[in-house]
Amino acid sequence: MSLQPKGSGEIPAETVRVARAAFPKGSLAIRVRDELGPLFTDEEFADLFPAHGKPAWSPGRLALVLVLQFVEGLTDRQAAEAVRARIDFKYALGLELDDPGFDFSVLSEFRDRLVDADAGRRVLDGILAAARDKGLLKSAGRARTDSTHVLSAARELSWLETVAETLRSALNALAQAAPDWLTDVAEPDWFRHYATRAEDSRFPKARTKRDEVGLRIGRDGTRLLEAVLAPTAPHCLRALDEVETLRQVWVQHFHQVEGEVRRQDPKDRPPGATRLVTPYDVEARGSVKRDTMWDGYKVHLSETWEQGTPNLITNVATTVATTPDSVMGEEIHQGMAARDCLPGEHRVDAGYPTASQIVAAHTRHGVDLQGPMADNTAASAGGPYGQDAFTIDWDHERVTCPNGVTSTQWHHRHSQQGLPVIRVRFSPADCRPCPHLRECVNSPKSERRELNLRHRDEHEAVRVARAEQQTDAWKDRYKIRAGVEGTISQGIGRCGLRRSRYRGLAKTSLQHQLTGAAINLARINAHLIDTPRARTRTSHFARLRPAEQQLDGAKC
């Protein structure tokens, strides 16, 4: 299909007349079109289509349909039917009343084009650009960010289901690619065990019997992999995605001992960041956050926080579930900078701020990153000989202990995590006779004190942040960050943010970009009709909490 832009973008007069009569008070689609105008043009998506071929339906209009689809929680069929039958949709899209619309499959095809070109950001960008032109989005203001877990579109599988379904998926792919070869290789029992889905089988209840079934699946999968990798097998079979998935899952769960297939000990399995959890979504990962365990992804939502304008989502970032919040600050700020939406003050959850992230936000982007800093967990951190009790002379590269003894060594090293640190050591001759040695050092055998310091700018940033966050004024200001949790709740309730609609990180990321765009349209509409913002629900008992406890709760 080719892109052939046509039409001026003006709404046909008859469509305007009928829409005004049918919706005298307006609707979301009508108000957004009147306020923001045409949000997208065909030229913005020209690179997604070839120069020749059958004319495609307007991609600029399709982008708006995708956003409206998420605003109202419609399926592809329902969205296509709304374009054909609903007057307010025709008004927003600038269509004639008798326009037949398009087949619902066009939406899926257009999403695939957006995914292949990594163009999902353009949809959210279009909403933000239009909002800025109308004075609804201010730069260099305040923003807040939080993340939430997202379940994979593929259902969660037990261990037996995972290995059985992985083998069945590989057998189906091989049956399609080389049926004659597989017929000669397959064992007679394979057709009985793997012809139907694992969920349709009844695995034994006894632990020993289940272990036997798992080893039988492990032996069958190993036998299949050996056959695929044999010199006589068609070479193209090794390139099948399902075969590679089978290989990875078998490396994770099985190994051979003296020629016998055995199950891997859990401690010998790969870390969660590389461990596959289902053969039907190979990019999903398993993760744990406090009491929540899930297989899938994680999404980070950043929104503005200003009076007199709607709080708009300015950045959406999607990662695998195992990516920690603490490494996302730079990516989020780069995304905001690309949209010219960098805030002057950025408040985040406790998982985000680290010394390096605070310094990088300030030096690279001019952003004041604020969030609860983790306490110093060293055994002597709070005592009279904690690190804060030592005086650091950065210019002369020496440290003085509380008893007046000066360090003798100052070396630039790297921590176990690969981070640059400064290792400071005192002389054993000075520390050994000190009566407070055992209070100062953690190891009972150590004869001198050692300190690991961050570099000066990071050390000062942490010191200032930890001191400031102990004040009531900081706690009171920080409480406003909790408002972004309402945005996550809105995304879950309106757009199904909690579960991915699609398989794979790229498609899940597109879903989240569309979710952010849909929430922005809903909030712009609420702003236009003066809908008051919902108040935080507080139970009658919680309202009786003393004021000092309310301030302490801001750290949670």
Image: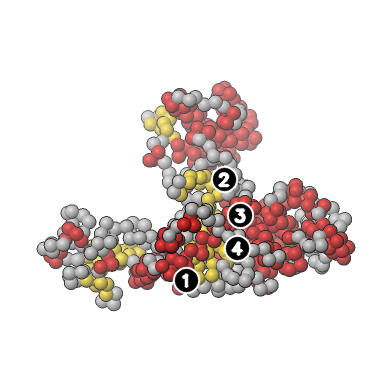
At 58% from the left and 73% from the top, the residue drawn is: 139
Residue found at the far top of this picture? 188
Q: Residue 113 location in percent, x, y? A: 68, 55
Image-based side of 155 in relation to 372, left or right: right
The residue drawn where x is 55% and y is 56% is 537
| Nearest to viewer (mark 2 / mark 4) | 4
Q: Quadrant of residue 23?
A: bottom right
Residue at 51% x, 73% y: name it: 344
Verify CB contact (< 8 Å) between mark 2 and mark 3: no
In the image, which disc is placed on residue 152? 2
Q: CA distance from mark 4 to mark 3?
A: 11 Å
Alpha carbons under labels 1 and 2: distance apart: 34 Å
Could you tell me the amino acid type at mark 4?
Answer: Ile
Q: Earlier in the sequence, mark 4 or mark 3?
A: 4
Residue 473 to residue 265: above or below: below
Q: Could you classify mark 2 by the number of other residues whose Cα lies within 10 Å: few (under 14), some (14-19), or many (20 or more)?
A: many
Q: Which mark is residue 368?
A: 1
**Pointer 3 residue:** 491
Q: Which mark is residue 313?
A: 4
Indicate the quadrant containing the C terminus: top left, top right, bottom left or bottom right.
bottom left
Residue type of the residue flagged with mark 2: Ser
Q: Residues within 10 Å of mark 3 (few under 14, many from 20)?
A: many
Q: Nearer the viewer, residue 17 or 277?
A: 17
Q: Quadrant of residue 373?
A: bottom left
Residue depth check, mark 1 versus mark 3: number of the one nearer the observer? 3
- Residue placed farthest to the left in the image? 433
